[in-house]
Image (cartoon, grey):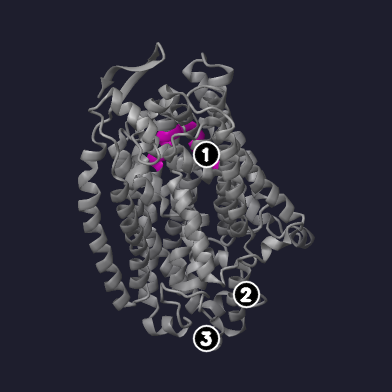
């Protein structure tokens, strides 16, 4: 489909406005790297929360969620636990505040607050930088693939030679992805965090209006009876057994012969044994969530807040801002696609690419004018995620490598200019890898299962276990990351076929997570116990600054001996209660708009009641206690004198 001139004009106006805004803001952002990367810690928490949500409202992820809802129905509400989305609940309840108390600029710089500045800490610092850059490249590849597939459905092909298309079927999608990434890079590189946050708040407004419009269009044009005629038994149910219990062949007449593609995609995804998959997903997700945010744009938003209390509030706002509007749109796109499936995928398509449902529906069923506005909103979604990811990368290269090890005395302008260069280089690398990836789901599974499997063990232990040291962190991360990369290589060479059949068929990334996780734990323990513990000065400073709960008894006793007035964190049970309630609350934020769009009113009212009840519980059990828990920062300055730790002063 070719876009109408009106739609193209709306999109071009938006793109030009974004670039102009980035340059207008760049004067403030380029004062120093604190302003460039963290906005000078002056942005309000609600603005950062909206920005963070806008960054997560990415086009590739939205295309994937539309595909999941169409194929898996309401059971797809659980599939985002792959990332896991409930890490936002862990962050809002306690981890954002713990992280923000460090007063650092990046996740790698945070390492010195936990492990000090010895060799083990230096090695840990380096491995976090490496992981952060690998992660950023992975997410850029993921965004590149999504935006290319999206735009290709609307614009004329850049390459039309049949021989070239046969050899490189995704070449047009990749070329359009390259163009959009280039445009977005301009304003991101110039404006830094100020540009990213302010443009993302604007983009969120466009996205919200777009989402509401799509949902209303679907509800107006598709009756509940029509919806029910194309949904198999079990599609509307959130619950499942050992198997998925969803058979698309029961509605064969409604979706013609292409209905077999639904069951084929379920089989190829490896989610048929859903009970086992859910158990592995929850097991993996809990550990990843407890590890805290990965060193990406989510962490940068937390570190950009004014104080720990606002960090917690910011993380809570993400779920409220992101999920209802996004799923209202996702539900609208899904029911339009399913009720027009034979028309949408007519002709020679026998195995439709369900990841392209979103652009196909827009291309065929949204009127001129509104389509341009909706596309501007969805391109904004891509730009938000891409901008946030790119902004996180140079912070690690400039602040954690160049400034720390190469040129610590350079001027602020030089650091900012170097940030421009590194941003462009990171984009180039991400795009290069994007050309090698075939599907969005492929890269998502590798990032959240394989790569994060190498990140998880070390980053859980760093928060909750006093004996864990810098060497343990380094060897845990190295062993995990190397295992994930080696398994990826061996899988591409066809040398680990057993991972394709145990325990989840065709889901090698999920199958490899336990292997990577166990090897990483072994690396953590060997690195820790074969080297000395961190000195008491470092551990006591960290404990009194962050005040975590967990296995800190020896350090807690030393701190209390020196300062009997110190109040240790005893909130483990309350925090876990709030996490459990928060996970239920988050699922209802996703389910309520879907039930509304498909007009399943009984489920809608039940879900709404649960959402209200969990919100009230969190109000009294979490929100009202933020002042008491994170209202003030208590720090104790410690020095080593004659082999005895003595308090010099207490700072508030």
Residue 248: in magenta span: no
Q: Residue 167 occupies which quadrant of the picture?
A: bottom right
Q: Residue at x 31, y 43 (%)?
A: 312
Q: Which mark is residue 526?
A: none
The residue nearer to you, when weighing 148 against 38, is: 38
Q: Residue 525 occupies which quadrant of the picture?
A: top right
Image coordinates for residue 360, horizontal then vertical, percent:
54, 67
Mark 1 is surrounded, within 10 Å at the Cα level, by few (under 14), some (14 to 19) or many (20 or more) other residues, namely many
Mark found first going from the N terminus, 2 or 1:
2
30 lies left or right of 256: left
Mark found first going from the N terminus, 2 or 3:
3
Q: Report, in whole angstroms, how far the alpha carbon at label 1 lies from the one at label 3.
A: 44 Å
Q: Residue at x 49, y 32 (%)?
A: 190
Q: Which residue is mark 2?
A: 264
Q: Bounds of the magenta span?
A: 182-199
Label count reads: 3
Q: Quadrant where the N terminus lies?
A: bottom right
Q: Quadrant where the C terminus lies?
A: top left
Q: Main secondary structure of the magenta part?
A: helix
Q: Which residue is mark 3?
A: 251
Image coordinates for residue 491, horizontal then vertical, percent:
72, 55
Q: Which residue is mark 1?
A: 390
340 lies left or right of 303: right
From the viewer's perspective, is the residue at label 2 or at label 1 nearer? 2
Residue 191: in magenta span: yes
Helix, strand or loop at mark 1: helix
């Amino acid at each position: 489909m070719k876009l109408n001139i009106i739609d193209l004009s709306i999109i071009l106006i938006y793109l030009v406005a974004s670039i102009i805004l980035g340059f207008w803001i760049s004067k403030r952002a380029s004062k120093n790297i604190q302003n460039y990367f963290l906005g000078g810690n002056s942005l309000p928490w609600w603005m950062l929360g909206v920005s963070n949500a806008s960054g997560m409202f990415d086009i590739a992820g939205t295309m994937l969620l539309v595909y999941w809802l169409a194929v898996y129905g309401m059971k797809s509400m659980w599939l985002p636990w792959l990332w896991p989305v409930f890490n936002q609940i862990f962050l809002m309840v306690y981890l954002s505040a713990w992280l923000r108390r460090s007063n650092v600029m990046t996740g790698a710089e945070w390492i010195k607050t936990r492990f000090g500045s010895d060799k083990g800490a230096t090695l840990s610092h380096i491995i976090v930088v490496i992981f952060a850059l690998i992660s950023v490249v992975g997410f850029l590849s993921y965004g590149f693939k999504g935006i290319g597939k999206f735009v290709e459905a609307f614009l004329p092909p850049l390459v039309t030679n049949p021989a070239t298309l046969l050899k490189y079927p995704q070449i047009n999608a990749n070329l359009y992805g390259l163009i959009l990434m280039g445009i977005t890079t301009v304003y991101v590189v110039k404006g830094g965090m100020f540009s990213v946050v302010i443009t993302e708040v604007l983009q969120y407004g466009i996205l919200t209006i777009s989402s509401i419009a799509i949902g209303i269009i679907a509800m107006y044009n598709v009756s509940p009876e029509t919806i029910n005629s194309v949904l198999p038994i079990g599609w509307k149910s959130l619950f499942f057994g050992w198997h998925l219990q969803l058979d698309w062949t029961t509605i064969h007449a409604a979706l013609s012969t292409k209905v077999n593609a639904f069951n084929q995609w379920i089989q190829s995804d490896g989610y048929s044994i859903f009970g086992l998959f859910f158990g592995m997903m929850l097991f993996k997700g809990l550990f990843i969530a407890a590890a805290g945010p990965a060193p990406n744009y989510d962490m940068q938003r937390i570190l950009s807040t004014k104080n720990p209390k606002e960090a917690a509030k910011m993380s809570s706002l993400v779920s409220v801002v992101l999920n209802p509007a996004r799923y209202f749109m996702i539900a609208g796109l899904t029911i339009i696609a399913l009720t027009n499936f034979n028309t949408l995928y007519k002709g020679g398509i026998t195995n439709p690419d369900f990841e392209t449902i979103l652009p196909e529906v827009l291309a065929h069923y949204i009127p001129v004018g509104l389509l341009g506005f909706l596309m501007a909103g969805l391109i904004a979604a891509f730009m938000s995620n891409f901008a946030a990811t790119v902004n996180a990368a140079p912070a690690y290269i400039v602040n954690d490598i160049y400034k720390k090890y190469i040129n610590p005395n350079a001027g602020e302008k030089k650091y900012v200019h170097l940030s421009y260069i590194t941003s462009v280089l990171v984009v180039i690398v991400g795009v290069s890898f994007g050309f090698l990836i075939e599907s969005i789901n492929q890269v998502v599974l590798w990032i959240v299962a394989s790569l994060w499997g190498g990140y998880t063990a070390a980053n859980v232990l760093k928060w909750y276990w006093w004996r864990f040291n810098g060497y343990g962190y380094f060897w845990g991360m190295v062993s995990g990351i190397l295992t994930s990369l080696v398994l990826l290589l061996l899988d591409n060479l066809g040398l680990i076929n057993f991972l394709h059949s145990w325990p989840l068929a065709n889901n090698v990334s999920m199958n490899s997570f336990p292997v990577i996780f166990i090897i990483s734990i072994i690396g953590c323990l060997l690195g820790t116990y074969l080297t000395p513990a961190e000195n008491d000065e470092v551990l006591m400073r960290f404990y009194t600054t962050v005040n975590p709960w967990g296995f800190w008894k020896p350090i807690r006793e030393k701190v209390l001996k020196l300062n009997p007035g110190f109040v240790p964190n005893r909130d483990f049970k309350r925090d876990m209660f709030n996490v459990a309630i928060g996970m239920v609350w988050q699922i209802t934020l996703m389910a309520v708009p879907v039930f509304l769009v498909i007009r399943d009113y009984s489920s809608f009212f039940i879900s709404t009641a649960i959402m209200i009840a969990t919100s009230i519980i969190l109000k009294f059990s979490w929100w009202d206690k933020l002042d008491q828990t994170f209202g003030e920062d208590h720090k104790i300055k410690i020095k080593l004198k004659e082999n005895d730790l003595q308090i010099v002063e207490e700072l508030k």
